[in-house]
Amino acid sequence: MARLKSKWCNLSEYVKEVKQSFSRAFNERRDRRGTLWGDRFKSVIVENGGALLNCLAYIDLNPVRAGIVKRPEDYRWCSLGYHAQTGNREDFLSDDFGLVEFGVTSSEERLTRYREYVYHAGAVEKEGTAKIERGILEMEEKGGFRMGQVRRLGYRAKCFSDSGVIGSQGFVAGMLHYFKERIPNKRKRVPLEVSGFEGIYTMKRLSRA
């Protein structure tokens, strides 16, 4: 058990296992051999403050620079996307953003200031890459770069449509009881509160949809 704990608490080992397992499965399905990933996993020690802020922004802007999305939050697999689309479920990510050292104590304010930095950095034109459009930047500036309930709801639209039942705690509990009698399930299910939306519950975590 100690060996497994040591192994799976090592980020390098974890990424190695994921990449190797995926490569084997992919090669088997495509009847191919050889490596699949362009390079090995790299772990870099980054100083807090400005260095961390710039590093995070660079990573969050990658899908924008690649022309995959118009806004960083539209890409689920980056920190801003995870914050917007899941409400940072179970505090999986740090909300430091390199801004604690600058005296920004509120996590919500750090997210707002980090978004402001990312959007301004992403609007700078770089040869051979896409950028955040001027109209999008101006829209964010008008809203003070804040992520309000309406914006959060928009990012979770797909999750809402996939969740099955949405409503008050009592309503969802009633529906769970209704379905339990018709569709047996060994797992005990309870209404799950949707983070960021007071009084709204669902049958399953929206971040899993």
Image: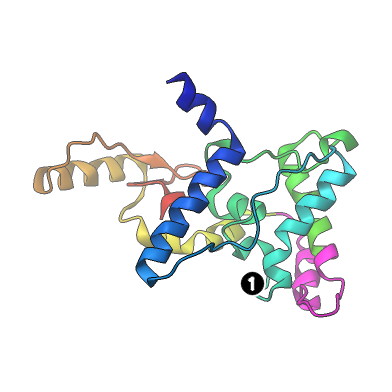
Task: Residue 55: give x, y in percent of width and height.
Answer: 80, 51
Q: Is residue 69 left or right of residue 100?
A: left
From the viewer's side, name the closer residue of 36 and 52: 36
Q: Is residue 133 magenta?
A: yes
Task: Residue 159: give x, y in percent of width and height.
Answer: 43, 58
| Kind of residue at disc 1 | Val
Q: Is residue 52 visible?
A: yes
Query: Residue placed farthest to the bottom in the image?
Result: 128
Region of the chain picked out in magenta, as a range: 120-146
Query: Residue placed farthest to the front in the image?
Result: 33
Considering only vertical position in the picture, is 14 above or below 121? above
| Residue at (41% x, 55% y) in the render | 209
| Residue at (31% x, 53% y) in the render | 165
Considering only vertical position in the picture, is 56 above or below 74? above
Considering only vertical position in the picture, is 130 above or below 117? below
Q: Is residue 31 left or right of residue 93?
A: left
Q: Residue at label 1?
A: 69
| Quadrant, the N terminus | top left
Q: Is residue 196 visible?
A: no
Q: Is residue 51 magenta?
A: no
Query: Residue placed farthest to the top in the image?
Result: 2
| Residue at (49% x, 49% y) in the render | 18
- How crowded pointer 1 is (Cα within 10 Å; few <14, some 14-19, many 20+) is rated as some
Task: Residue 96: give x, y in percent of width and height.
Answer: 75, 38
Q: Is residue 55 left or right of residue 69?
A: right
Q: Secondary structure at mark 1?
A: loop
Q: Is residue 65 left or right of residue 167?
A: right
Q: How many marks?
A: 1
Give the quarter of the image for residue 43: top right
User: What colour-coding does the image apply?
Assistant: rainbow
From the viewer's side, name the closer residue of 143 and 118: 118
Task: Residue 77: give x, y in percent of width and height.
Answer: 58, 57
